[in-house]
């Protein structure tokens, strides 16, 4: 449907306050304890209604449930997206924090949360949607566009806008696309960003040696379907990834339940599938066993994993649209398949982020999105405890030797930022992520020189301080809680500091060694 044929609605000006403010609010609601998930959700909706001034909740608005976190002590954290007159409010998401009796304690809010109607928006010119969006994605071949009318308030300047997803294929047949936001009144581009997030048989893998993998007996043989976790691994047949759907591809089958030959650049197409299948299982298990998360969307459902995507595509991606992971065969020369442990964990973490805080893939929020995937991709590697691909702070060191990014001093790649500055949000999100990665290393291992699992690191601080680490397992638990409970779509680095300190307080107590280490590490990368 084109913009000119869609019904144009009015949208009020939305007043804006600081992003991700964890604000103490009066407990003015009922005292009954929400004993179940449904009760907690209902109480959260009531809390928003009864505290409309706090949330800026008014006529024409509605709440769309996004995620639920129930703590062991009975407190709850209910995440909502917001709509206005049926239109999504970009930058209007919020989290309702409730005590054990269902009373409102705090709120985490994205940029926009006051929807008092002050003016109407004139009729939208057709060219402000798809046409401008297509011109903003010149590298996308065979492109199609899908415009959506939204209230766009992510930068604190609310306006009616067209959010257009341009989808097609890139040079190697990989999914390529842009999300382009254009002002509905003037047609001017507000922003654009990537639509895709780049990054018990016997398996002979490429990166992790011989591994045991879960398979399913079928038709006298076996398929790479994991009955425990629900994911399936398929051969994309070098299909152009832009056209891949969850039903695409061919299932891998074997009569012996022995898979792959363990070689790099293998002619045996099941070899890459072994890595993908096993690493997806390790990622699932990491989130479930460490963080209590039941699958990417916390709904127990497994994803579809495609290997051999595109032609000489040296990358991997997660796609929300097909709820699937896609990996290429490498560049055909020096880099083999992109199915190593931390790469797989990285890409699937994009799905976790999308299902929770939904950090926007632009500016500092985009850097945090990428950093979150680097952090948890690395933690999947540590969790797997594999003798071949040991835990380290070198991201994608197996498929992109000696490494693609590193945590102790991100700037060693020549592009990433070690320290926060006011211009860091202008970097590509893969390079602005360096600030978050550096923080994670310092909080985990501390500053200065250190050898871990045979790898030498030497991490400086931006403020010349000395930082003592608390171990990556504690830091990862803090970061997971910050992501799933306190961050919202527009969280920036300052907001991430606040979110992680809130999480450290919840888990270990305010003023604890862990709390102080988190704060010191943020200061050490100039985030205060």
Image (cartoon, rainbow, N blue to C red):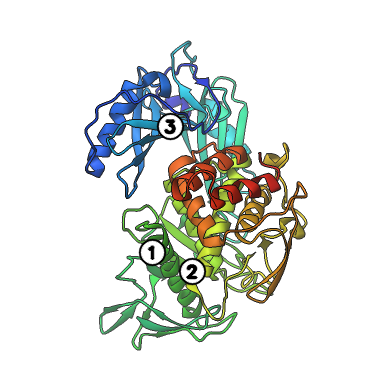
In terms of image quadrants, where is residue 445? bottom right
Q: Which mark is residue 383?
A: 2
Q: Is label 3 in contact with label 2 (beta carbons under 8 Å)?
A: no
Front residue of this view, candidates 152 and 138: 152
Residue 268, position as x, y percentages in the image: 50, 83
Spatial CA span between label 1 and label 3: 28 Å
Spatial CA span between label 3 and label 2: 32 Å
Front residue of this view, candidates 153 and 447: 447
Say left or right for 229 vs 308: left
Outermost residue to the top: 118
Residue 378, position as x, y percentages in the image: 56, 63
As helix, strand or loop, the secondary structure at mark 2 comes to: helix
* Residue denoted by label 3: 107
Q: Is residue 20 visible?
A: yes
Front residue of this view, candidates 320 and 311: 320
Q: Is residue 484 above or below residue 305?
A: above
* Residue denoted by label 1: 289
Where is the N terminus found, in terms of image quarters? top left
């Amino acid at each position: 449907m084109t913009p000119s044929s869609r019904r144009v609605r009015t949208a009020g000006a939305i007043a804006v306050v600081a992003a991700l403010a964890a604000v103490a609010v009066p407990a003015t609601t009922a005292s009954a304890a929400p004993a179940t998930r449904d009760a907690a959700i209902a109480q959260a909706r009531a809390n928003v209604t009864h505290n409309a001034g706090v949330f800026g909740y008014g006529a024409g608005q509605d709440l769309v449930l996004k995620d639920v976190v129930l703590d062991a002590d009975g407190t709850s954290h209910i995440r909502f997206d917001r709509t206005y007159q049926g239109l999504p409010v970009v930058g209007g998401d919020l989290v309702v924090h409730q005590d054990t009796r269902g009373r409102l304690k705090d709120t985490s809010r994205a940029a926009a949360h006051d929807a008092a109607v002050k003016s109407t928006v004139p009729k939208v010119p057709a060219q402000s949607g798809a046409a401008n969006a297509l011109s903003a994605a010149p590298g996308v071949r065979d492109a199609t566009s899908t415009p959506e009318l939204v209230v766009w308030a992510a930068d604190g300047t609310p306006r009616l806008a067209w959010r257009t997803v341009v989808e097609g294929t890139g040079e190697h047949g990989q999914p390529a696309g842009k999300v382009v936001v254009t002002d509905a009144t003037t047609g001017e581009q507000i922003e654009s960003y990537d639509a895709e997030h780049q990054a018990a048989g016997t398996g002979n893998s490429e990166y992790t040696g011989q591994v045991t993998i879960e398979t399913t007996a079928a038709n006298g043989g076996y398929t790479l379907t994991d009955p425990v976790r629900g994911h399936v691994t398929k051969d994309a047949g070098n299909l152009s990834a832009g056209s891949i759907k969850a039903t695409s591809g061919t299932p891998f089958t074997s009569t012996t339940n022995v898979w792959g030959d363990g070689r790099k650049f293998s002619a045996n197409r099941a070899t890459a599938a072994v890595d993908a299948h096993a690493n997806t299982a390790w990622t699932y298990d990491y989130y479930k066993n460490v963080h209590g998360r039941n699958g990417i969307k916390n709904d127990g459902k497994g994803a579809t994993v495609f290997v051999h995507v595109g032609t000489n595509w040296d990358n991997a991606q997660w796609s929300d649209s097909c709820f699937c992971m896609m990996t290429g065969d490498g560049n055909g020369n020096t880099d083999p398949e992109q199915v190593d442990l931390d790469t797989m964990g990285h890409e699937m973490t994009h799905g976790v982020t999308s299902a929770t805080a939904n950090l926007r893939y632009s500016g500092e929020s985009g850097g945090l999105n990428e950093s979150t995937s680097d952090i948890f991709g690395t933690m999947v590697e540590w969790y797997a405890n594999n003798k071949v691909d040991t835990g380290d702070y070198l991201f994608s060191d197996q498929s992109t030797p000696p490494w693609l990014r590193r945590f102790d001093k991100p700037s060693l790649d020549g592009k990433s930022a070690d320290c926060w500055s006011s211009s860091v949000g202008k970097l590509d999100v893969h390079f602005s992520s360096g600030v978050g990665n550096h923080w994670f290393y310092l909080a985990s291992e501390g500053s200065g020189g250190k050898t871990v699992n045979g790898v030498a690191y030497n991490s400086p601080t931006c403020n010349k301080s000395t930082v003592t680490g608390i171990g990556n397992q504690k830091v990862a638990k803090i970061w997971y809680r910050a992501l799933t409970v306190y961050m919202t779509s527009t969280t920036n680095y300052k907001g991430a500091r606040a979110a992680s300190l809130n999480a450290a307080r919840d888990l270990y107590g305010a003023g604890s060694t862990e709390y102080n280490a988190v704060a010191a590490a943020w200061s050490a990368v100039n985030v205060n």
